[in-house]
Amino acid sequence: MNKTLQVLLPPLLGLLLFVGIWALVAQTTPTLPGPVKTWASAVQLFSDPFYQKGPNDQGIGWNILASLQRVAIGFGMAAAIGIPLGFMIGRFQFLNAMTAPIISLLRPVSPLAWLPIGLLVFKAANPAAIWVIFISSIWPMIINTAVGVNRIPQDYMNVAKVLNLSEWKIFTHILFPAVLPYMITGIRLSIGVAWLVIVAAEMLTGGVGIGFWVWDEWNNLNVEHIIIAIFIVGIVGLLLEQVLVLLAKRFSYE
Amino acid sequence: MSMVDPAIRSGAWAAGSDAPEKTEVRIGFIPLTDCASVVIASVMGFDKKYGIKIVPSKEASWAGVRDKLVNGELDAAHVLYGLMYGVQMGIGGQKKDMAVLMNLNNNGQAISLSNQLKAKGAVDGASLAALIKKEPREYTFAQTFPTGTHAMWLYYWLGAYGVNPFTEVKNITVPPPQMIANMRVGNMDGFCVGEPWNARAIRDNVGFTAATSQGIWKDHPEKVLGATAEWVAKHPNTARAMIMAILDASKYIDDMKNRSSVARIIAEKSYVNTDFDSIEDRMLGQYNNGNGKKWQDANYMKFYNDGTVNFPYLSDGMWFLTQHKRWGLLKEDPDYLAVAKKVNQIELYKQAATQTKTPIPKDVMRSSKMIDGTVWDGKNPKSYAAGFKVRQS
């Protein structure tokens, strides 16, 4: 009992403090809705999350699912390409030197700057949004995986040489287990970026999705719904990361 | 097709099948009061009468509408007149041949100024110009798209009072909610936008209406039904059916006894997503400028007006080109008349108008008197564009 209290108390206190500050700020800013008003609005919003009133008015649940689908595709492709690429860059010095300038050049580009390029190439809004997720979430995975490979103690590789292991055996028995923690860090960073970016991309491209939903509520200057959306985005992002951490733990050798 | 009277059908055009090539059309719209005719054509089922289904698709921004039209994600759109000509001429983007099928509305936009300016005595164009000269600082004005109608109304209005919108003030393109948010914190001095945003500025107590667009140009063209020329060439019958359905909707909306119910429909979350109160008054022509003046405006937002609203006058299209030239968006004088003839689909419109018994004006030009007293009638566009005292090129 005492132990659970010790675990739960600090986060609860933190949340309470946060809501308290929010309520205080809302008191002094008449246009900012406070926690009570926002909660009431959220309850109403979530009482019917899956209604369909034509293409321009769908429940909040559909919007979240639409965004998650885009993230899944974009992030999935980024992982499928970024992680193997990271391994190769970490393993082969030549490749590392070859790609280093490109990566350093493209990595800091603001995600939304990629959107017009996507629109030009794919000639459609949805693939362009997915492209933005792909291109923004691929970097942490490439870089972290490559760093992980680089950090493998030279002793391991020497042992591999002595035992005359094949490249495949090196990969499955040495590289992969040793790099896994780095890779997971990369994936966690990436999923965070992917979720961050989709909201912004959807604001510009329209259609069904939590991003355009926020935009539409902003068009209506409905501040309660905007705050609710901030929480939704935050909570979904947190859940995504936790799911990935769980998955990673299953595969971990520790 | 059985629903259409055969006598009308045979009279409209001579040969070939008139069946729509595409039965479901996606028409993009921006949540503004003047998207009404597109929405009503779909909601009230005027589209079915002509064998098509209109799917209104809410878009995030004018740039988004432009991109989706150009890359074919949208079949057509409720779009700014000037934007269509901007894309046609390749101003600030890819050049693409566009088609204006019909004009959707006249009037109903406005220029709002911030309450801070009001406190300093700037309540209309003349007093604003006086303040800008007397207390120079960086005045910021916003419009919705660089080549669009709101930019042109704003520039024309400032220019009419001797203020150069490019050198004497800062002008930026931002989405309407950002205009309100910026004006609230004193970051923005004025903006030109469609309703319900000007009414909203008053309701939110951040600004007031300094000028209506109908005060700048009575019965000015505004939003059009736009598509790419390529799409229209491939789907002429669908395009005609769209015009006919929207003409029917326009008639319905201009019947004043339907206006309140129309306002209620378009205020829904699917469409404009606002409270009914913010749109109804100005849709009925009941204006309140937020500065103590109330009036019934005879030139409120019109959607039909015996067909004079909808006819794609060549002189209207040419006017946007003259302004693009005036403000240096176009470097050279285009062949004004030839471009307008190419973009505005007069023939298609006439066929649709004949079928729906919509009166067709005799002339493809019309004569309009602007706020500064100049008359635009489509003649001598080159000297008209070069004749303004305040200009950029």
Image (cartoon, rainbow, N blue to C red):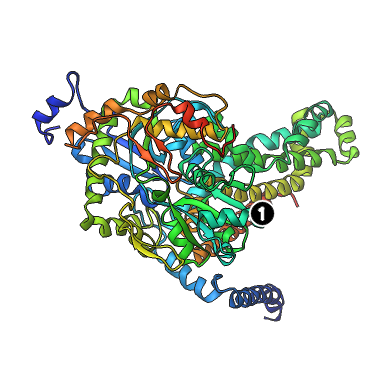
Image label count: 1
- Residue found 36% across the figure and 46% down from its top: B218
- Residue found 30% across the figure and 28% down from its top: B346
- Residue found 40% across the figure and 21% down from its top: B338
Amino acid carrying label 1: it is Val
Image coordinates of residue A233 in percent, x first then y, are: 57, 57
Neighbourhood count class around disc 1 (C-alpha, 10 Å): few under 14, some 14–19, many 20 upward: some
Element at badge 1? helix
Q: Is residue B107 above or below residue A173?
A: below
Residue B109 seen from this side: yes
Residue B230 seen from this side: no
User: Along the line of sight, which residue is nearer the eye, B99 or B295?
Assistant: B295
Looking at the rendering, in which quadrant would you find the N terminus of chain A? bottom right
Q: Is residue B381 above or below residue B254?
A: above
Image coordinates of residue B258 in percent, x first then y, are: 22, 56
User: Along the line of sight, which residue is nearer the eye, A17 or B46?
Assistant: B46
User: Along the line of sight, which residue is nearer the eye, B299 or B273?
Assistant: B299
Q: Is residue B32 above or below residue A41?
A: above
Read off the residue under disc 1. A245
Based on the displayed image, in which of its 4 quarters is residue A116 positioned? top right
Image coordinates of residue B94 in percent, x first then y, are: 53, 28
Q: Left or right: where does residue A57 sit relative to residue B322?
A: left
Image coordinates of residue A254 in percent, x first then y, are: 75, 52
Based on the displayed image, in which of its 4 quarters is residue A121 positioned? top right
